[in-house]
Each structure stands twice: as C-alpha cells, then as structure tokens.
Image: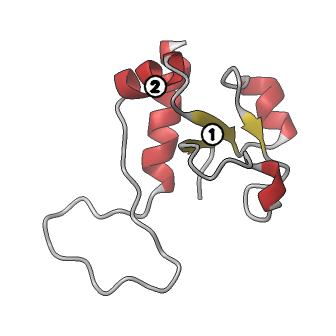
Amino acid sequence: MRNVLFGVVLALAACSNSKTDDKPAAAAKPGSEQFATMTPDQVEAELASKSITPVDCNGEGTRKKMGVVPGAVLVTDEAEYAPTELPADKTTKLVFYCSNPG
C-alpha cells in the first residue's frame, strides 16, 4: 500500500503546476488553481480515516497494469469527465492521481 501511496503523491506533485523556487508567481491565469501537496504518510493516514476520497484519472489499460487505490472514484477521461462522476457531497476532500501526467 505504501508504494501505491508514494506513487499517488509523486503523481500529484507531477500533475501540479506549482513553482519550486521562492520567486513570486506571475498573476494567475483565470481558472488556474494552487493545490496543497501531501506526503505519503499524510495520504495514508487520511485514507485510513476515510477523510479523503481518491480519484483515479488513469485509463483502463493503466488501471489493469498498475492497479487502483482501494475505494477510488474512477473517472472516464482525465481531461473531460462529467461532474456527476465525482461525489455529490461538495465538502468531500478529493485526491486526484494519475500514472503519466502531462
């Protein structure tokens, strides 16, 4: 499980567009967001306490090859999935992951 969680955190970090230097970022483009990062231990703890819901943005081939985090919501297409594929409760904390970002 730890390897899967480590992969999730790496994928989350790779999927984000955050800067790693200390320079101030330029004005954000409309629709761009800054997302928090989590360590593997934080993800594991929050999954165990059921305070987050993992969202798998991989395709079927990748899911068959790499597996799926238990309890993950499976979206049909990482770029254009329907909002109805996500939990209806808007207070649910979601953690998106993919194996090949970008």
Relative placement, left or right, of 58 versus 14 is: right
Whichever of callouts 1 and 2 sits on the residue coming sooner in the sequence is 2
Label 1 to label 2: alpha-carbon separation: 20 Å
Q: Which residue is mark 2?
A: 46
- The three-letter amino acid code for the residue at tag 2 is Glu
Q: Which residue occupies 55% across, 12% down?
A: 1
Q: Nearer the viewer, residue 2 or 95?
A: 95
Relative placement, left or right, of 58 versus 61 is: left
**Residue 99 position in % (x across, y down):** 63, 39
Identify the element where label 1 is drawn.
loop
In the image, residue 39 sits, relative to residue 91, either above or below, namely: above
Which is closer to the viewer, label 1 or label 2? 2
> How many C-alpha atoms fall within 10 Å of the one at disc 1: few (<14), some, or many (≥20)?
some
Identify the element where label 2 is drawn.
helix
Q: Which residue occupies 72% across, 45% down?
A: 87
Residue farthest left in this picture = 22
In the image, residue 48 sits, relative to residue 27, either above or below, namely: above
**Residue 18 position in % (x across, y down):** 35, 62
Q: Which residue occupies 66% across, 24% down?
A: 69
| Mark sitting on residue 7 | none
> Is residue 68 visible in the rendered structure shown here?
yes
| Mark sitting on residue 99 | 1
In the image, residue 7 sits, relative to residue 75, either above or below, namely: above
- The three-letter amino acid code for the residue at tag 1 is Ser
**Residue 13 position in % (x across, y down):** 42, 47
Relative placement, left or right, of 66 versus 35 is: right
